[in-house]
Image (cartoon, rainbow, N blue to C red):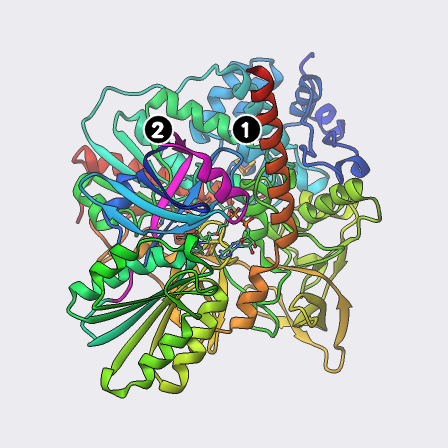
Amino acid sequence: MAELTQKERMKIKRHDMPNQDQVVRRGNFEEVALGYTEQTARVEAERCLQCKEPKCIKGCPVGVLIPQFIKALREGDMVKAVEWMKVKNNLPAICGRVCPQEVQCEGNCILAKKGEAVAIGRLERFVGDYELAERTCPLVKAPKTGKRVAVVGTGPAGLTCAVDLGRQGHEVTMFESLHGPGGVLVYGIPEFRLPKGVVHGEISYAVECLGIDIKTDHVIGRSFTLDELLSDYDAVFLGTGAGLPSFMRIQGINLNGVMSANEFLTRVNLMKAYRFPEFDTPVKIGKKVAVVGGGNVAMDSVRCSLRLQALLAKQSGGEPGEAHIVYRRSADEIPARAEEYHHAQEEGVIFDLLTNPVEIIGDEKGCVKALRCVKMQLGEPDASGRRKPVPIPGSEFEMEMDTVIMALGTSPNPLVFVDATGLERTKHGTAVADTETGRTKKQRVWAGGDIVTGAATVISAMGAGKRAAADINSFLKGEAPWA
Amino acid sequence: MYKIVRKEILSDVTKLMDIEAPHVARKARAGQFIIVRIDEHGERIPLTIADYNRDAGLITIIFQEVGKSTKQLGKLEPGDSVASFAGPLGHPTDVENFGAVVCVGGGVGIAPIYPIARELKEAGNTVISIVGARNRDLLFWEDKMKAVSDELIVCTDDGSYGRKTVVTEPLKEILGDAQRKIARVWAIGPAIMMKFVAAATKPFQVPTTVSLNTIMIDGTGMCGGCRVLLDDGARFVCVDGPEFDGHKVDWDNLLSRLQFYREEERIALQEYDHKCRLEGAAAEGGK
Ligand SMILES: Cc1cc2nc3c(=O)[nH]c(=O)nc-3n(C[C@H](O)[C@H](O)[C@H](O)COP(=O)(O)OP(=O)(O)OC[C@H]3O[C@@H](n4cnc5c(N)ncnc54)[C@H](O)[C@@H]3O)c2cc1C
Ligand SMILES: Cc1cc2nc3c(=O)[nH]c(=O)nc-3n(C[C@H](O)[C@H](O)[C@H](O)COP(=O)(O)OP(=O)(O)OC[C@H]3O[C@@H](n4cnc5c(N)ncnc54)[C@H](O)[C@@H]3O)c2cc1C
Ligand code: SF4
Ligand code: FES
């Protein structure tokens, strides 16, 4: 393409993402967003104005060199595009799929002010998928330093930290309590949003290039304690996430058919219950499902529910049933990624907004029969800056339900704090760590990701892993001793 | 992969295995459990640590074949491996010198009660053990239990061995004998048995510890699938337990939650049996 003028660039319309048909996809777990073709990606890349002071970079928690990679992409130099990308982000195929771009890079893009932002996330995914297939940018390991680092948890924080330390020549051992690595990327986020092949591809590549040892089935706090790890390793990074589910304090929480989103998603994603009995773990889904919450976890749960209902209906005949989101605030406050909310709407999820459960009602067998809710209205802004929902007196009503999934947020799992003398925790259960370096209050222990911030995002966990790796490296080289 | 190094058949449906898992054996204690997953398609199932050998890095498990996973595990032989083996999970048993204690093991619950009885004995307690099963064929480890108990009572539901009664009967007699001054009771077995043991000890106000066997997935506090209702709220059995005060447990809720996946368990077993028959027939045909 000949060099375009800024005006011409601004005339190009943002390219839609080709998606799997909304009716068909309700009945399968295959990826919804199909990815740009090379042609589309290059034309979309032409929309970028190559700002002198790019605002998009400021919106990205790790500062991906966005205009640089986009320029290489539109010039057709994919190898260069990957190189620019990898300066700041090791896992673009993952971030391109799951980052909330609308409030990060794209939300800051100058074009978003007047019209539509450059589709940075989709371009990032395109570059990431290219690298996944071609591997033009190998991970290179520096000469061995003889230093040993333990990384606890194999989610995005731990993985990023391990890769950066591996590249510096340190010997890295990862510990994971589950039977496979990946953290939320494998047990939480469903296949139709983030194919497990992408995650496993990235992990096995890192393991191969850098010789990282991953010890699964190792629960730190039980199999080994933090204090024990410290006697074997020069430094320890904790990236154990925020995996502890919370339940509402209402009647009926222990009825059959009430689950945490973590239980439901773990059964479906990690244990592959959607392929039961080919896989051993089952999951029970009702004809009327209520998912309580409005974040990504809630959207993933409700969309998995729809799919399971459709699969069941296909097997046994009959109607698939319905799946609801029950959320106490309004549509404007929904914290889920915008694309997931739209996809959920397209797929036929019923949104009961400004609605809050007050009781789960059971039948004589101890199974869920109905959800009793109260209508809400928005009052004054609360601590989070969002308008606080308050119940409307006398507005209680019942909805017939047979499955209730609680997606109400999570906190750090306390197991890792067992026998970890001196590791400080806040009253929310999160680890106290320096935001820049990741240093905790315990010597030679760093932490980052959801364990420090509480449930947040993939990219913020990766950023924390990266910053901690840099500081650990300086520490191991003797440049930044512990104060 | 974790290798099975020894297998012992304790009854038609009860098997013992020693599994090589040094990362579990190094810290394993009585009262804790492991989670095993047989292969890439397998579910994660919890089994109690029946014994351990730290030096050899071995964990002993004993299981009853009640469904698909336990049947499949029972078919494996020494030299075979299982895909995952995580632990030790849960809190160990609180062992001190309480004085006189009773350990009740029902069915496959004899396996997990054994190391507890042993540790209680080593701590200086007078240990009275009661073990029971539906019939003689389901009993095992009588000798081992005898070796760690000051007194051992054996009973079967059908009277094919020992006393013909359920475990709660001798328990009530012992508690009724004030001279014995029973300080504590431990009970491990089917949920229904533990429910009745708790009911039996309640009038005597003897603290009673039970080890709950709820449905579990991760076993690390991540899913809440294992939650149980106590009289002051819900707990996660895998991290807060598995041992609890039997007088505080909402048994009906526990029993109803154990039933939730009955239909799926039946389907899984049926498919598995069908597959085994086909494989058996193919092997026959190949001969
Ligand atoms: C369903 C769902 C959907 C989400 N969707 C999005 C999205 O679209 N976009 C986005 O940006 N973010 C999303 N998030 C949030 C994002 O996934 C997390 O913020 C991110 O994964 C945190 O990374 P982490 O590395 O800190 O922890 P995790 O990913 O939680 O990984 C922690 C790992 O540590 C292991 N571990 C825990 N305790 C121990 C222990 N004691 N010993 C050994 N190992 C241990 C865990 O098993 C786990 O594998 C979603 C989260 C969920 C649950
Ligand atoms: C902490 C803990 C420790 C345990 N320790 C042992 C042990 O040492 N030895 C042992 O044999 N079993 C033990 N169990 C029970 C064991 O986990 C189950 O028997 C096993 O998961 C059954 O799997 P399955 O696929 O073979 O049968 P399924 O198909 O899952 O079930 C078949 C039948 O067994 C019943 N069942 C399923 N799960 C349980 C359960 N958790 N408890 C009681 N009945 C159940 C079902 O209701 C059904 O009737 C323990 C459970 C827990 C939670
Ligand atoms: S990593 Fe996320 S926020 Fe940063 S540029 Fe990529 S999509 Fe945008
Ligand atoms: S088994 Fe998942 S929390 Fe206990």
Q: Residue B50 in the image: state x and y as whole percent.
A: 31, 52
Secondary structure state at the residue bearing disc 1: helix
Q: Which stretch is magenta?
A: B66-94
Q: Residue A481 in the image: state x and y as whole percent.
A: 17, 42
State the separation of the CA atoms marked 2 and 1: 34 Å
A88 or B205: nearer the viewer: B205
Query: In the rendered view, would you say B190 is above or below B249?
Result: above
Viewport quadrant of the N terminus of chain B: top left
Q: Which mark is residue A222?
A: none
B4 or A291: nearer the viewer: B4
Side (left or right) of A205 relative to A310: left
- Res. A80 visible in picture: yes
Instruction: State the count of labels.
Output: 2
Q: Residue A461 in the image: state x and y as whole percent.
A: 44, 43
Say what amino acid the circle numbered 2 marks: Gly
Say what amino acid the circle numbered 1 marks: Val
Give the residue displayed 67% in from the left and 15% down from the top.
A3
Q: What residue is pinned by disc 1?
A: A198
- Res. B91 visible in picture: no
Viewport quadrant of the C terminus of chain B: top right
